[in-house]
Image: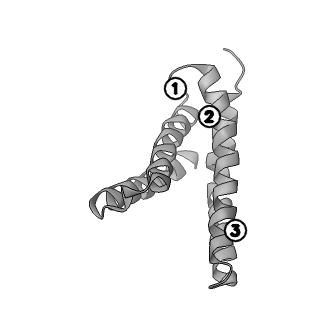
Amino acid sequence: MLKLYFWALSILIGITIVRDFFTLHITNIHTFLVDLFQLISIVGFYGYVFKKFFGNLMFWKIFSVFYVLWYISDGIYLVSEDLEENLRSAIFAFTFGIIFNIPLLIGLIKYGFKKNE
């Protein structure tokens, strides 16, 4: 089941990155960081799902904690921007995003903090 989730998430993230590149939404630093962090998170999640290891274990420990904290705080920030316009849809989008990404977030934490084999 995680392999199916991985491929679906990879396709969605790939479409997002290509869309950002071709529509020139990557002009601001926030969009660039979102795309970069998503790309790195997919590499880590690939390693978790397919039992491969890439890079340094300390990097994955730091990145996994950073990514979870960044993902949640970025979501809260984006929701707070939409509070004046449409609170209900902003909270729904944030909640759906968190629920949809729970396997990714847990997988990154487990990948970063796995026991040495």
Q: Is residue 80 above or below residue 104?
A: below
* Foreground label between 2 and 3: 2
For label 1, count other residues whose C-alpha is less than 10 Å away and answer few (under 14), some (14-19) or many (20+): few
Q: Is residue 78 above or below residue 57?
A: below
Q: CA distance from mark 2 to mark 1?
A: 17 Å
State the residue in front, 86 or 99. Answer: 86
Q: CA distance from mark 3 to mark 1?
A: 31 Å
- Residue 7, percent across and down? 45, 50
Helix, strand or loop for disc 3: helix
- Residue 58, percent across and down? 64, 21
Q: Is residue 8 above or below residue 46?
A: below
| View extreme (top): residue | 117
**Position of residue 20 in the picture relative to residue 48 (left or right):** left
- Asked if labels 1 and 2 touch by Cβ distance under 8 angstroms, the answer is no
Which residue is the site of mark 3?
Answer: 95
- Circle count: 3
What amino acid is labelled 1 in the image?
Answer: Lys
Which residue is the site of mark 1?
Answer: 52
- Residue 85, percent across and down? 62, 85
Which quarter of the picture shows residue 28? Answer: bottom left
For label 2, count other residues whose C-alpha is less than 10 Å away and answer few (under 14), some (14-19) or many (20+): many
For label 3, count other residues whose C-alpha is less than 10 Å away and answer few (under 14), some (14-19) or many (20+): few
Helix, strand or loop for disc 1: loop
Which quarter of the picture shows residue 91? Answer: bottom right
